[in-house]
């Protein structure tokens, strides 16, 4: 299977020799480039088991209690990972963006996962077979260290998310999420493309759509944000002041990003 990425002009840009398309390696995930470099040496062994799949919006990538077999890499789109209660309520614990891996925690322990992974938009995902990946990691210590570091990062993010759900008020949870989206921008007003719906944001922070809408309207009135159907912008200095006044340490929060 050749590796390529479709350019904006529609022409194929071949990236033969890379497990992850080369154009993707500088995106959001901090381990992407390192994993790419490590896995490049084992491409010949891994390549036969690789597959790429396009999912429609709201499609299930994996369901609760599935037996993990693949490491997933999101090339395009957005995926939410969460839990669904017996009455159908959903709590989102992670939102996966392009350039990020997921499915690493269950396969690292060899346990059935209790979460559900569902696409939030049309998504293109590369499946990396863990059986073959595990074989090459036994002899490649740098690859193993990189993989363990990624699992550790995602575990710490899960702990931080639980802490937020338990300790923070809803307005603080929303402000914290907004800060994660804009913290690395030097601009005073920062646009958030593909902003979550109020319902999706409510699922992620453990609240209701109505409460989220009310909080966002308050933020808008206080000058923290501006939004309409076409755009969503955050006034970063005002957001940072709100977080500081709420007792949150911005430096500590940045460490978990």
Image (tube, grey):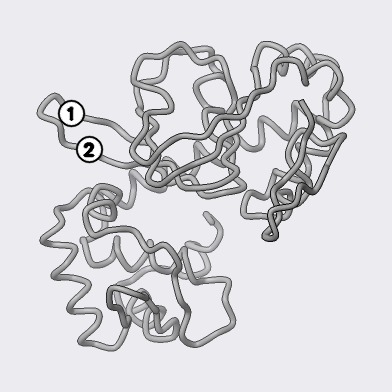
Residue under numbered circle 2: 90
Q: Residue at x 41, y 79 (%)?
A: 240
- Percent coordinates x, y for residue 66 in the rendering: 41, 14
Tell me the SS state at disc 2: strand
Q: Is residue 141 left or right of residue 240?
A: right
Residue under numbered circle 1: 85
C-beta proximity under 8 Å, tags 2 and 1: yes
Q: Is residue 245 left or right of residue 210?
A: right
Quarter of the image for residue 64 reads: top left
- Percent coordinates x, y for residue 73 in the rendering: 60, 36
Q: Quadrant of the N terminus?
A: top right
Q: Is residue 8 left or right of residue 209?
A: right
Query: Residue 96 shows which numbered tag?
Result: none
Looking at the image, the residue that sits furthest to the front is: 10
- Percent coordinates x, y for residue 104 in the rendering: 56, 28
Of labels 2 and 1, earlier in sequence is: 1
- Quick check: 181 above or below 43? below
């Amino acid at each position: 299977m050749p590796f390529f990425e479709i350019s904006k002009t529609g022409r194929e840009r071949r990236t033969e020799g890379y497990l992850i398309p080369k154009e993707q390696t500088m995106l959001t995930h901090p381990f992407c480039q390192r994993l790419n470099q490590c896995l490049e040496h084992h491409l010949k062994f891994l390549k036969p088991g690789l597959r790429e799949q396009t999912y429609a919006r709201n499609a299930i990538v994996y369901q609760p209690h599935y037996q993990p077999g693949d490491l997933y890499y999101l090339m395009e789109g957005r995926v939410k990972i969460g839990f669904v209660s017996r009455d159908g309520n959903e709590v989102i614990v992670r939102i996966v963006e392009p350039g990020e891996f997921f499915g690493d925690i269950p396969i690292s322990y060899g346990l059935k996962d209790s979460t559900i992974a569902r696409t939030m938009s049309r998504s293109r995902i590369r499946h990396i077979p863990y059986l073959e990946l595990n074989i090459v990691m036994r002899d490649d210590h740098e690859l193993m260290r990189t993989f363990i570091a990624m699992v550790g990062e995602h575990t710490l993010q899960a702990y931080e998310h639980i802490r937020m759900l338990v300790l923070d008020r809803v307005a603080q949870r929303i402000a914290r999420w907004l800060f994660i989206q804009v913290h690395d921008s030097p601009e005073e007003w920062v646009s958030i493309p593909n902003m979550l719906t109020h319902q999706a944001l409510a699922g992620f922070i453990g609240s209701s759509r109505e409460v989220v809408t009310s909080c966002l309207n308050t933020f808008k009135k206080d000058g923290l944000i501006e939004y309409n159907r076409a755009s969503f912008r955050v006034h970063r200095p005002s957001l940072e002041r709100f977080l500081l006044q709420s007792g949150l340490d911005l430096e500590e929060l940045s460490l978990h990003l």
